[in-house]
Amino acid sequence: MATETTMAAEMPEELSCSICMNVFCEPVKWPAVPTSECGHSFCRLCLFQVIRWNICNGSASVRPRCPICREPAIDEVQYASPESLILDEALAQKVLEAFGADAVKAQEVANRAELERMRAFEFEAPLHLLGSYALRQGQKINLRLQKEHVGLIAHALVHSKRRIGFVLSNYPYVGAPTRSATLCGFGFQDYTPQQAMAALHCNILRYGGLVIQALVGPELHILSPPVERQGPAYNGALAQADGATQCFWTAMVREQQQQPLAVRAPFRLSGRARPLRNFVNDVFCSLVPNPYRECDVSLPRSPALVPAPAPSTPSVPTDAEFVED
């Protein structure tokens, strides 16, 4: 803190970042289009935050613009990593000569720690196209999937810590409304691809189809264009006899950070005020609809995906049944 205060008090205007109003830390040039005259530079951390804000809170279809001259950036910058941004070596050398190596190194360590904290919320996740449904955090749903989705679930068990992305549209794209979901009922052990396929094989034999339970989490922001990946196909045994493959969508996503709830002191009503409170509460509940009422409705049954169970076998859950705690 003392180093930052000293640098801020002594910094010339040409060595200050226009975003954080502090001394440049690893200054990088704004990735403008080749025909642009923009030559502005910003801290690596500040520029990366601007790019991420444009995807998560702005419009993913609009390219980010320079905070000073509003020149648009190139298309590839929206999916760039912090390391791929071009360092302004001349400006970095001026900062080093003005403030010394120790002060610059201390600020670089702090900014890199913040970059690592930001990237801790980013991971590659498989995407499942759920459609236009309303989901809320903390909700449990049961999904009956086709056998073609075995590779999707196996990838989630092995690579993405049992997390998948529910895309609430019919096609995945950057900016599509997406919810994080954690697979339940698979224990806490780490899975190899063979163990994941064996566990899903037992699931199919038990329910007569692939039935999973998922706990809905916070919102996800798709950071990169979704790509198709190939996974092992389910062939009725353990998925690899004929070498067939099945495709599913994956993308780099960012989990929305949850804001901590403010702790409020309990408010106690006197005995005379409680009947009035109960009356107002009853009137309010009768006039204001429940915002989560549409989430409590079971998803429609698809005859093509959910065959009627045999009389001798127990009933199988529908395509997606919402289970309330």
Image (cartoon, rainbow, N blue to C red):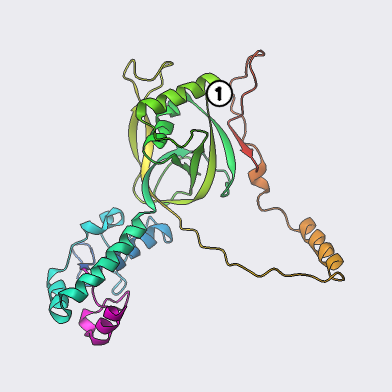
Residue 6 falls within the magenta-colored stretch: yes
The quadrant the N terminus occupies is: bottom left
Question: At x 21% / y 68%, what residue is drawn?
Answer: 26
Q: Nearer the viewer, residue 288 or 69?
A: 288
Q: Quadrant of residue 80?
A: bottom left
The amino acid type found where label 1 is placed reads Ala
Residue 17 percent coordinates (x, y): 27, 76
The residue under label 1 is: 304
Q: Quadrant of residue 28?
A: bottom left
Q: Nearer the viewer, residue 243 or 265?
A: 265
Answer left or right for 221 relative to 35: right
| Residue 303 to residue 10: above or below | above
Question: At x 45% / y 41%, what residue is drawn?
Answer: 164
Q: Dot 1: what SS?
A: loop
Work out which residue is located at the far front of the displayed protein and give it. 189
| Residue 302 to residue 128: above or below | above
| Residue 35 to residue 119: above or below | below
| Residue 316 to residue 119: above or below | above
Answer left or right for 3 relative to 93: right
Answer left or right for 155 relative to 76: right
Residue 98 percent coordinates (x, y): 15, 81
Question: At x 25% / y 77%, what residue is drawn?
Answer: 23
Callout count: 1
Q: Residues within 10 Å of mark 1 (few under 14, many from 20)?
A: few
Magenta residues span 1-26
